[in-house]
Image: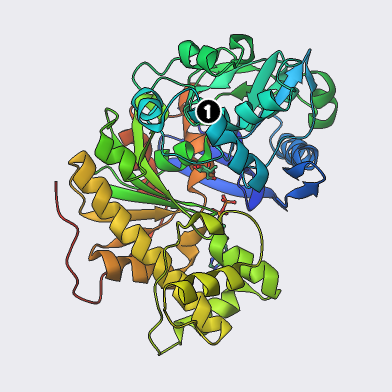
Amino acid sequence: TPAARLAAIDLGATSGRVILGSVGPNELELRQLARFPNDPVPLRDGLHWNLLGLYRNALDGLALAVREEPGLASVGIDSWAVDYALLHDGRMLGAPFHYRDPRRGAVGPPLVHEHVDAAELYRRNGLQHLPFNTMFQLACDRADGVLDGADTMLLIPDLLVFELTGAISAERTNASTTGLLDAATREWDEGLADTLGIPRRVLPPLVDPGTRIGMVSGAALEVVGAPVPVTAVGSHDTASAVVALPTTSDDIAYISCGTWGLVGVELAHPVLTDAARRASFTNEGGVDGRVRFLHNVMGLWLLSECVRVWGEALPTLLEQAAAVQASVPVFDVDDPRFLAPGDMPARIADWLREHELPVPASRPALVRCIVESLAQAFASTVSVAASLSGAAVSAIHLVGGGAQNALLCQATADRSGLPVIAGPVEATAIGNLLVQARAVGAASGSLESLRALVAATQRPQTYTPTTTRKPVTHG
Ligand code: ADP
Ligand code: LRH
C-alpha cells in the first residue's frame, strides 16, 4: 500500500493549523502548512468566534496543501466541541457564539432544567454539566426567538464541511457533546429535543468518522484549486487526540492537554452512575464507538490568560517558574469563575485569599502555583476516572501543546505517582489524519493498530515520578 497524502484542518481554541500528512503502513509524517491564532471577538450581544477568519485561513492552508500535493487524497476537519451556527437555506444566521460567553452560560442551564433535571439529563446523555453544552445554548437561542428561523444547526467542523462541500451532516463524536445525543444508542434523542422545544429539523443526519462526505466544490473550489474529497474524522478535537495515543496498552489514562485538560480513560460502554455524574465525568463518543470517559479540567487556559494580561512570553515564565524554591499553594482550577476571559491573575489571587491561602508574590511564583494546581487536578482526576470506571491505570499519556511544558509533565508524574508519557504535541491532527488514512485505504485495522503506528513513528518523552506519593489505585 503506498502512502497517502492527506490534509488535516485542526481548529483549537488557542490556535488553528493546517497540516499535511503522509500516511502509509509504516509511515506517518507531518508538515505544518499554516498556523493562525484563534482570538474571540466581543460583540454587543456577547462573545463570538471569528469564524469567517478561521475559515479563510483554513481555505488558504488547504490551497497550499493542494499546491504541494496535487494528488491530495482527502481533507478532514476537527475543532473544539459544542459551538455551532444556525442556518436558513444555507445562510448562516449570525456569527457563532463562543462557549466562554458568560451571559449564555448563566441563562441556558436554568431554561433546560425547568423541563429536565440534572439527574435525568445525565441518564439520557451521560454528559458532565458544562453550562455551554449545545443544548443549553440552543435554549438561549429559543428564548431569544432566533431558533424559529433556523432550518439547520451545524457544529463548527460540520459548518466548515458544509461550506467546502454543500453537504449537511453531523459527525457523531462531536454530536455527542451537544447533550442531544442518546448516550446508549448514539442517535439523536428526539424526545429530549421535543421536550426542550428544539425543532427536530435542525438536527442533521449523523455520520460516523471515516465516511466520505463530499468534494470541495462551489466558491471553495475557486480558492482551493482542486475538488479534494472531504472525509469525516473524529471532528471533536478531543476524539481525534485520543485516536493518536502512542500506545497499544489499555491500562493507561490520557490527558489531552491544550486550552483544556481532558482527563480520562477509554471505555467500551458509558458509565451513567450517579457517582460519575456527581464527580462531573462525561461519556463522550469516540471514534469506532469507543467511549471517552473523562472530566474537563480548566487546562492551560489559566496560564494563557495570565500571559495575555501580562504581555509576557510563556517559555521564559515557565523557566523562571521552574526555579521557584518557595512552596506554592494549590487552588481549585475547576472553579467556574475561571471560565470567562478576564484578569486571571486577580481572580486566582481572590480565590486564594478567600481560602486563606498565601498569594504568590511574583509572576513566576504564580505560574508555578498554576502549574502545580493543574498537575494536582490531573492526578486526582486520573485516580477518580480509574475508580469510577474500574479501569486499571499504570501510566498517563499527555498529548497536545501541554506536552511541551516539562514542568507540568513532571509535576503530574510526581503528584500521580505514575509515569507521564508526553507527546505527540499534534496528536489531534494525527488522529484526524489516521482516520482519513484508514478511509482511503492507506492504513487499516482497529484503533490499536493506528496507535501502534503512532508509537512506532513518534518520539514521546517519559517523565518518571521523582517523589514518593501514594500511587493511583488500580481497578
Ligand atoms: P488548542 O488545540 O486547544 O488550541 P494546543 O494543544 O495547541 O491547544 O495547546 C496550546 C497550549 O500549549 C498553550 O496554551 C501553551 O500553554 C502550550 N504551549 C505551546 N507552546 C509551548 C511551549 N513552547 N512551551 C510550553 N508550552 C507551550
Ligand atoms: C477542547 C474541547 C473540549 C470541550 C471544549 C469545549 O478543545 O473540544 O473537549 O469540552 O473544547
Q: Position of residue 76 (x, y in %)?
A: 59, 31
Q: Vertical placement of 467 versus 443: above or below?
A: below
Name the quadrant containing residue 78: top right
- Seen at 55% across and 24% down, the residue is 232
- Seen at 48% across and 27% down, the residue is 179
Q: Vertical placement of 60 versus 227: above or below?
A: below
Q: Out of 124 and 408, give the one closest to the viewer.
A: 124
Q: Out of 416 and 86, give the one closest to the viewer.
A: 86
**Would residue 139 be visible to someone looking at this image?**
yes
- Seen at 59% across and 79% down, the residue is 316
**Would residue 9 be visible to someone looking at this image?**
no
Does the numbered disc 1 mark a residue whose Cβ is under 8 Å from ligand 2? no
Q: Position of residue 245 (x, y in %)?
A: 37, 45
Q: Position of residue 322 (x, y in %)?
A: 45, 82
Q: 118 left or right of 84?
A: left
Identify residue for label 1: 112
Q: Mark 1 packing: few (<14 Cα in 10 Å), some, or many (20+)? A: many
Report the amino acid beneath label 1.
Val
Q: Position of residue 372 (x, y in %)?
A: 40, 72
Q: Vertical placement of 218 versus 433: above or below?
A: above
- Seen at 22% across and 39% down, the residue is 389
Q: Out of 36 and 226, give the one closest to the viewer.
A: 36
Coloring applied to the structure: rainbow
- Label 1, secondary structure: give it: helix
Quadrant containing the N terminus is: top left
